[in-house]
Amino acid sequence: MMSEIYRLRIRLEPRSEISPREELPSRNFYPASPFISGKKVRGAFLTAIRRTMTPHTEAKRIPLSEHSKSKFQKEAVEGFLKASPALPRSESDTPREVPHAPFTFLSCKACEGEKKHLQLYDATGDLLKRGDLSQSTFCDKHKKPYFRKGYSGPVCLSSRKPLQTPEINTRPAVAIDGVTGSATSGGLFFMQTTTHHTPLITEIAVASGELVDMIRDLKKSRALLQLGAGRARGWGIVEIDDIEFVQSHSEFVKEKEASLQKVIEIYGGFVLIATSGIASVVLENDRFISRPYVLEVEGFNLEKSYGRVNSYTGWSMLTNLQKPMITGAKEGSIFFYRVPDISEVDFSKLLALELQGIGDRILTSSQMNQVVFWEGEH
């Protein structure tokens, strides 16, 4: 099964403003996230694939009870394992874009104005060796400890360079009364949109060669994907510009195994960096509760974590109700798993976690519990 997983790196070209909403509205204000989540990217690709597999007129005739048995559900939905957030492309030779810098990435407060030349320091090794970040050397120019601060924002892990952030705009709108067709009294509201001036990059993982061919066909046909809210207004339109590479699971393992093995040899374990919320659901006192960690990964136990906690929810399109609130570790959190004996490590199964996610399948299918491996200090 592992040999059937494929990793694709895809370049998307924005054709309009995008309104990616990751939070519920605050009164009459709909905020936009500065990045497009993997959940929205996956949904946009699946919508485009469904149009090629099942015409819209036929899809509307399928009873809800039959959806789980359909070819689209079995082959496309279940086979589309992961989509990373769509982020501005890094110019690094070995780009690894993440939406939130790890909490162990430090910046210098005195250098904040120099965004293009901002030096970020990866203090993950300091955390593992010393247990804290207080002795980290973080800036060549400014030596005073109070200049050090954590860096938040999208970065390239390999080059430790910040990614370009989008321009955020606020658009006014008026709610329309469905009965009278006129403006609703007190119906003024505001929506934020983002304008991306550079191509976006996303990495997806699929479980069959047939899905790879479908995505290639979307690229050949110059298919347009729609991301985020406001699609009826013409927002959220992106074009599949290029597929930079298609990599099999065995090729992915060959590329990453040496760096992961070196990390385990030096630190006695491996580090996972959260690229989405991380949680596990457990039964306690006859009720389900969420925890902001996954205690065990491929038989290796969690020894240390570093980050913050956040609450995650959403809105169900099927029931039109708010989904249950989940307490999870925030994006950028660090998790260290101890490896007692490196000879016991199955690197093929372990590295598959970066393509499939960790923990409960119901959470990974919602694009939570997504991680990347820390590959050591560059």
Image: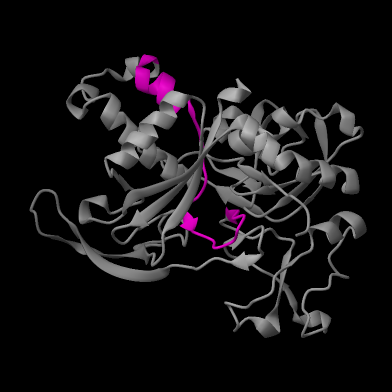
In this rendered view, identify the residue nearer to me: 31 or 227.
Answer: 227
Can you say which quadrant of the picture contains the N terminus?
top right
Q: Is residue 96 magenta?
A: yes
Q: Magenta stretch?
A: 69-97
Q: Is residue 104 left or right of residue 78?
A: right
Counting from the top left corner in percent of width and height, residue 372 is at 66, 45
Q: Is residue 236 left or right of residue 200?
A: left
Quadrant in which residue 91 is drawn = bottom right
Counting from the top left corner in percent of width and height, residue 117 is at 62, 78
Counting from the top left corner in percent of width and height, residue 271 is at 77, 46
Q: Is residue 369 magenta?
A: no
Tell me the residue at 65%/58% (across/down).
157
Tell me the residue at 34%/41% (across/down).
219
Camera sees residue 284 = no
Quadrant in which residue 54 is drawn = top left
Tell me the residue at 61%/31% (across/down).
249
